[in-house]
Image: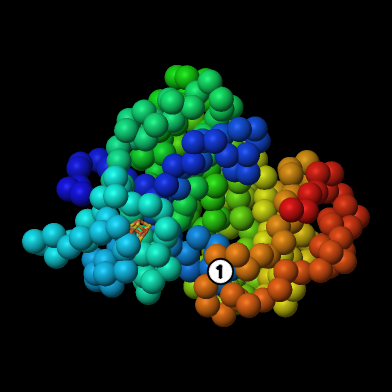
Amino acid sequence: MKEKNNTTPINKIIPLSMVDGPGNRTAIFLQKCNLVCAYCHNPETQNMCNHCGICVEGCPTAALTISDENKVLWNEDLCISCDRCIKVCPYNASPKIKNMTAEEVFDEVKKNIPFIRGITVSGGECTLYPKFLTELFELAKKERLTCLIDFNGTIDLTLFDELITICDGVMIDVKSWDKELFRELTGGSNINIIKNLKYLAEKDKIEEIRIVCLENEVDAENIIDNLDKTIGEKAYKIKLKLIKFRKFGVRGRLSNYSSPSEEYMEKLKNQAIDKGYKNVIII
Ligand code: SF4
Ligand code: SF4
């Protein structure tokens, strides 16, 4: 596909999702992330395709071809969504990316308006594309849709005040409190997390705080203990989502790890409730 100006790489659009925020929502997944989380369950969203061509031969429907300029091309009409290309890609990329403008994405959203409460943009890391998000949310707001951001916590959101003002809320991950553990788990730095939590809490824009829980890999206890030191008692009113690690889709060193036990999850929940959190859920 020839790239157009002002476009953003879109991994997929799920017309109706019940798991990406409150109510029925259209979920839009952008390609590329600044982290490489060991427990990522959609690792094919992490990188842009480098057109190496490895996935082309195994495509059963010839939906993938190589152009005269040595670019891998994807023919959506021929694709049967078997995802073989994604499974063989050694670079955590996908050849099935569409470069779309905010208007083009919103044309897809519009088809679902009678059935949805709002939109959620996820990734990859969607805040790598603040201009796209702002444009998309402006369009969505005209149709009275709520707009949520699914955020890995690490991009400095204080730089994007216009975006945060127009969005309704941010679902923020806190992946680890300890900076070394964070680096081991994600390959990145947690330097902006406290800043983002404070900034978003001041603007009342935290939709929920999420911790993916995995004993000995994630210091969930530490996170629960420290959130109120950054945003004070506001932390107790925000929904705290304790997410059980699941190995579905995970590649690499954690791909054979088991989910944490019910007892461990309940222990974390009780720790949070004892601390003062009013809205704690385990999923
Ligand atoms: S998902 Fe589509 S492009 Fe990928 S291998 Fe299957 S048919 Fe080919
Ligand atoms: S999707 Fe992966 S395997 Fe396929 S061409 Fe791109 S980088 Fe290579």
Against 74, residue 258 (above or below) is: below
Report the front residue among 84 and 233.
84
For the question of whether residue 118 can be seen, the reply is yes
For the question of whether residue 148 can be seen, the reply is no
Provide residue 37's location: percent of width, then percent of height.
53, 68
| Ligand 1 occupies quarter | bottom left
The residue positioned 52% from the left and 77% from the top of the image is 252
Against 248, residue 279 (above or below) is: above
Against 159, residue 186 (above or below) is: below
Q: What residue type is disc 1 on?
A: Val
Provide residue 250's location: percent of width, then percent of height.
56, 69
Question: Which residue was labeled with disc 1?
Answer: 250
Provide residue 229's location: percent of width, then percent of height.
74, 56
Against 107, residue 219 (above or below) is: below
Mark 1 closeness class: few <14, some 14–19, many ≥20 residues within 10 Å: some
Q: Secondary structure at mark 1?
A: loop
Report the front residue among 105 and 82.
82
In this view, the residue farthest toward the front is: 60
Report the front residue among 113 and 160.
113
The residue positioned 65% from the left and 35% from the top of the image is 22
In the displayed structure image, the side of residue 256 where residue 227 appears, left or right: right
In this view, the residue farthest toward the bottom is: 253
In the displayed structure image, the side of residue 104 where residue 33 appears, left or right: right
The residue positioned 67% from the left and 61% from the top of the image is 212
